[in-house]
Amino acid sequence: MKQILIRGATVLTLNGTNGTQPAVGDVLIEGTQIAAIGPDLEASNEALIIEGHGKLVMPGLVNAHTHSSETFFRGRYEKMPLEVWLLYAYPLLMGPVIDKELLHLRSLLLATESLKAGVTTLSDCFFDPPRHELDRLGTVFGAYELAGIRANVSSGVMNIPTLDALPFARDVVPTDIQQQLDFGPPITARAYVDYCRSAIDAFDGRSGRLRFMVAPSAPQRCTADLLTACFELAVAHDLPFHCHVLETITQAVTGPELYGRSLIRYLDELGVLGRNTTIAHSVWVDDADMAVMGAAGVSVVHNAVSNLKLGAGVAPVRRLMEAGVTLALGTDGVSSNDTASIFDVMRVAGLLHGASGPDADSWLSSVELLQAATIGGASSALMEDVCGSLEPGKAADIIMLDLQDCAFTPMNDIARHLVYAANGSNVDTTIVAGEVVMRGRRMTRFDEDALFEEIREHVPAYLKAHTEVEQRNRFLEPYFAEIHRRAAASHSGVYRYAGDAPLRQKNWQLR
């Protein structure tokens, strides 16, 4: 069996209480798993020896929520709330679907950036409107297989028309425009579950690193029968049920307006909250929501950077944790974050919650953030027995950082350096399932220079075409901005819409 011996490194296992303290030692990898951790380990003569002096060895990071669909839109938008941003990043009036070659490049680019930034596992809510096709989903799986990353991949679904998933939309949007947004019959629960079963048969467990996950987009965007069917399928196959819930103030109003209760309580009444449930965002939850979530044993993915850029708000992370919710970290998509670095999310989350109030005991510690970025993320992906900490028997998903770098000089507290000083560029080597997939800042399984060259050659035409799609959707912007404004005012209790009012125009910045 192939062996790798990392020798004489500073090792941070993040395994239990003692795992938060680094120790100098070796890590022995046999096949895909960690065989031993300790001093003076022996390996076979054929083993690959990696000298660890001056290096930190730790578990690979987990990006518990992202969207590969956005990877070509980095740096494209700003100063837009979610409801407006969606018009451009996920346009209602769509152009042609991205071709499979670009789909492959897009997915491979996200995997490359992730692995080079120390992310060994990601949960990708891949969104490919308007239909669900196995060969296109297979293209995403194939890109991740080529890169060597571990991933849960979904084909996110919604089957409620956009205007019916938003409060005030039918009042704000003129009837003739509403008719333009009528795209015909949506996918049924039975058809989507059949598709998921086919995807599970085709891709789940591929390469021992790739899994399918069930991902209804959001409770207000999916019918009740679709939500319950997805949850039952996820539980039956031990897969995550991954759903966006209460991301924005508009969604905080959506539950009471459309369902007479919060979206969390609505999900609870449907019986779809449980260990398999991973909730992305959870910004606008109240105490009653959090009690329900904790009792159900759900996980929450905190997307601190994306939530700030979209003006969505700040999730009550400390209270969620106290309620018994498992905390994970996610970047969200590269369009609403502009990076796939979990190091950035850790830093922002640590700083952000320091501004939550004068009680410093409620702030997040560096150790808590590291745990959220590793074992918490693994738990949200139902992989806590596979990865998230360094332990014999677990998968050898390991990153090595250069300690002889400004970010660690002089060394004071390793956890605080990692959260507040380090970034993805400090990662020198990335190992997934016992295979070195990035070393010396270079990918090992494919020619990354060729990848970047192909992107530079082919993507500009795609982005030029997408500019035309953006222009086609621009006329919808004031209506969706008004929906957002009314929801915010309604939630604050200082305004309730009555009668017609002119829409406020605003020049949003598009690049």
Image (cartoon, grey):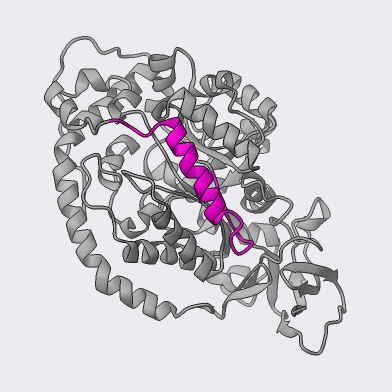
In the image, residue 324 above or below residue 211 = above
In the image, residue 313 above or below residue 94 = above
Magenta-highlighted residues: 185-213
Residue 421 visible to the viewer? no
In front here: 266 or 493?
266
Q: Residue furthest bottom?
A: 45
- Tell me if residue 293 is in the magenta stretch: no
- Tell me if residue 196 is in the magenta stretch: yes
**Residue at (51, 69) in percent of width and height:** 147
Q: Quadrant of residue 505?
A: top left
Q: Position of residue 467 (x, y in %)?
A: 18, 54
Q: Is residue 153 left or right of residue 271?
A: left
Residue 56 visible to the viewer? yes
Quadrant of the rendering where the C terminus is positioned: bottom left
**Residue at (83, 85) in percent of width and height:** 44
Q: Quadrant of residue 456?
A: bottom left
In front here: 112 or 92?
92
Quadrant of the rendering where the N terminus is positioned: bottom right
Query: How many badges with numbers are in the image?
Result: 0
**Residue at (29, 60) in percent of width and height:** 99
In the image, residue 454 above or below residue 64 = below
Q: Position of residue 470 (x, y in %)?
A: 19, 47
Q: Position of residue 496 (x, y in %)?
A: 29, 12
